[in-house]
């Protein structure tokens, strides 16, 4: 499983009170959008938590939406890799925050949830959406969730957020690679919450997630970093 994020120099990946804050944080970088589209074009499934779903009311998580000029190239790449026309959008929710009317659910999509929440979600989403009761309990077990995707034939899974989902994946040792775009901006922090790359877990001092730098690329003032996690 790989993850993709863009952050400012001071580590901000999202500003919840601003719509489409990721575009602002990316400083409208075409290279960052191209990378996002390319990763989606390579993926079998794009994994998104319910908070990111709610923050992206028009999101589809399709390659061509990230970078329309390369739509034909993305489609050709998927054909050459013998993949379906587009990756499957997969949403992770325990049922507390979820939009059953989100347009991404009109296409074949998957919702990974708990046994307790599955019946209500199944009754509220379009017929094209497959609702999977991953486990009992109040939270979705991500290890079992990813295993259920692998059983359905999804081998390359791309996580696009949010930072709490990334934190849980790192804490469980489930993330293999991280693509991180460093945007030439400083966001600052005052009173309003601004999310960092990893939220919801404390990795240091006892559970540090070590990563190994695989590559660095530059486009104008943006840096594109690729890390592998230590196993």
Image (cartoon, rainbow, N blue to C red):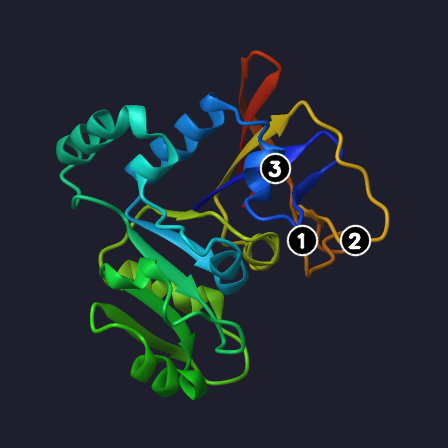
Disc 3 or disc 2, which is closer to the eye?
2
Of all residues, the one furthest to the top in this rendering is 220
Q: Which callout, 2 or 1, points at the residue further toward the start of the chain?
A: 1
Q: Which callout, 3 or 2, points at the residue further toward the start of the chain?
A: 2
Q: Secondary structure at mark 1?
A: loop
* Disc 3 residue crowd, few under 14, some 14–19, many 20+, Cα 10 Å: some
The residue sitting at 52% across, 24% down in the picture is 29
The residue sitting at 55% across, 14% down in the picture is 218
The residue sitting at 74% across, 57% down in the picture is 202
Q: Secondary structure at mark 2?
A: loop
Depth check, front residue: 84 or 107: 107
The picture places residue 88, in percent across and down from the top left corner, at 28, 53
Q: Which callout, 3 or 1, points at the residue further toward the start of the chain?
A: 1
The number of numbered badges drawn on the structure is 3
* Disc 2 residue crowd, few under 14, some 14–19, many 20+, Cα 10 Å: few
Mark carried by residue 211: 3
* Disc 1 residue crowd, few under 14, some 14–19, many 20+, Cα 10 Å: few
Depth check, front residue: 79 or 68: 68
The picture places residue 142, in percent across and down from the top left corner, at 47, 65
The picture places residue 128, in percent across and down from the top left corner, at 21, 68
Q: Is 63 rendered above or below residue 139?
A: above
Q: Which residue is mark 2?
A: 192
Would residue 61 appear left or right of 169 to someone viewing this image? left
Would residue 156 appear left or right of 53 to someone viewing this image? left
Q: Which residue is mark 1?
A: 17
Determine whether label 2 and label 1 are within 8 Å by CB.
yes
């Amino acid at each position: 499983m790989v993850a993709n994020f863009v952050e400012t120099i001071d580590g901000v990946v999202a500003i919840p009170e601003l719509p489409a804050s990721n575009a602002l944080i990316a400083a409208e970088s075409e290279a960052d959008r191209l990378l996002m589209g390319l990763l989606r074009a390579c993926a079998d499934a794009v994994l998104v938590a319910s908070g990111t779903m709610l923050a992206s009311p028009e999101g589809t998580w399709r390659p061509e939406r990230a970078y329309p000029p390369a739509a034909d190239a993305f489609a050709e790449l998927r054909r050459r890799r013998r993949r379906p026309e587009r990756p499957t959008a997969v949403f992770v929710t325990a049922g507390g925050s979820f939009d059953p009317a989100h347009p991404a659910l009109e296409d074949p999509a998957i919702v990974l949830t708990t046994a307790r929440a599955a019946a209500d979600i199944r009754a509220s989403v379009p017929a094209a959406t497959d609702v999977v009761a991953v486990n009992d309990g109040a939270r979705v077990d991500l290890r079992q969730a990813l295993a259920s995707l692998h059983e359905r034939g999804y081998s390359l899974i791309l996580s696009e957020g949010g930072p709490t989902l990334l934190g849980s994946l790192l804490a469980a040792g489930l993330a293999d690679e991280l693509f991180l775009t460093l945007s030439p901006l400083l966001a600052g922090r005052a009173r309003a919450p601004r999310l960092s790359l990893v939220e919801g877990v404390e990795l240091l001092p006892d559970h540090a997630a070590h990563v190994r730098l695989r590559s660095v690329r530059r486009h104008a003032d943006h840096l594109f970093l690729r890390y592998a996690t230590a196993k």
